[in-house]
Amino acid sequence: MRGTLLALGTAGVLVFSACQAAPSAGPTPAPKVAAEPTKPAAVTAPSPAASPAASPSPAAAPPTVSGPIDGISGRMLTVATGTGPKQVQVPESARIEQEGKGAVDDLKPGLSVGVTGKPDGTAKSIRIFPAAQGTPRPGQIPMSGPEQGNIMTNAVIESFDGKTLVLTAAGSRFSITVPPDTEVLKPVPATFADLATDKRVIAAGTLGPDGTLVASTVNLLGPPPPLAQ
């Protein structure tokens, strides 16, 4: 009897142990895979459509002929230049200008000017050059003759506030005081009848097949200022 109970007890222990719930197993972790080193992001070249438009190249300056008029036949001028006589045809559509009276209000940024100034930096007179002439002899030049002691400044207007004219030329900047009564000369309308022999002109336009300049503009120039030799 005792052996039977012992056997039953041992069996019960075994049964009880078997009936206990086994601890639930968690999800099997995935095997670790070594991470690949981070690759730098690829740089995508912009498509042609996304590229900014290229800036247009500045237009080339038109051909010019300058010098005194040596002869006039019909609407054809013969101009004496440093490289010999040149023919200039002046059609009815050409704009003809001569030097005339201006005012300090005409002094605008971007214009080329020649300023006759006193040694103290005050302007005596200002000449606005024709667009075709550009800026002759840019910079500051001592003057001779009646203007002995004064200084000519040929440059481009950077700014003007009504009192101080700021000019740039050859990498330099110049500040010149401009009194309200300063003489200002500028191109004003003229006619073909104003053209005459020995008058200095500068003509701009296009060259014909025979080398004749077909003018779109003709400017009568004032006398050159006396500069130091």
Image: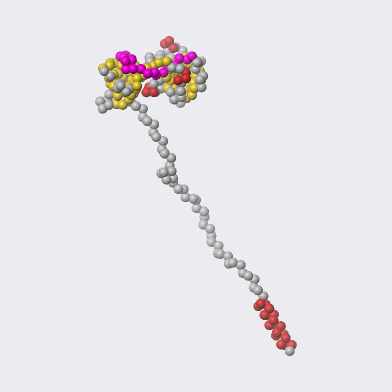
Q: In terms of image quadrants, where is residue 29?
A: bottom right
Instruction: Identify which residue, 67 or 180, lies in the foreground.
Output: 180
- Place of residue 82 in the rendered image (x, y in percent of width and height, measured from the top left): 31, 19
- The answer to whether residue 110 shows anywhere in this view is yes
Q: Residue at x 49, y 21 (%)?
A: 165
In the picture, the quarter occupied by the N terminus is: bottom right
Magenta region: 181-199
Q: Is residue 197 magenta?
A: yes
Q: In terms of image quadrants, where is residue 32?
A: bottom right
Check the image and name the residue furthest to the bottom.
1
Q: Residue at x 42, y 22 (%)?
A: 112
In the picture, the quarter occupied by the C terminus is: top left
Q: Is residue 182 magenta?
A: yes
- Place of residue 35 in the rendered image (x, y in percent of width and height, measured from the top left): 53, 58
Check the image and name the residue furthest to the right.
2
Q: Residue at x 37, y 17 (%)?
A: 98
- State left or right for residue 5 relative to residue 44: right
- Colour scheme employed for the rendering of this structure: secondary structure
17 shown above or below 203: below
- Place of residue 89 in the rendered image (x, y in percent of width and height, measured from the top left): 28, 22
Q: In terms of image quadrants, where is residue 56?
A: top left
- Place of residue 53 in the rendered image (x, y in percent of width and height, measured from the top left): 42, 39
Q: Residue at x 31, y 16 (%)?
A: 69
Check the image and name the residue furthest to the top.
146
Count of number-bearing discs = 0
- The answer to whether residue 168 shows anywhere in this view is no
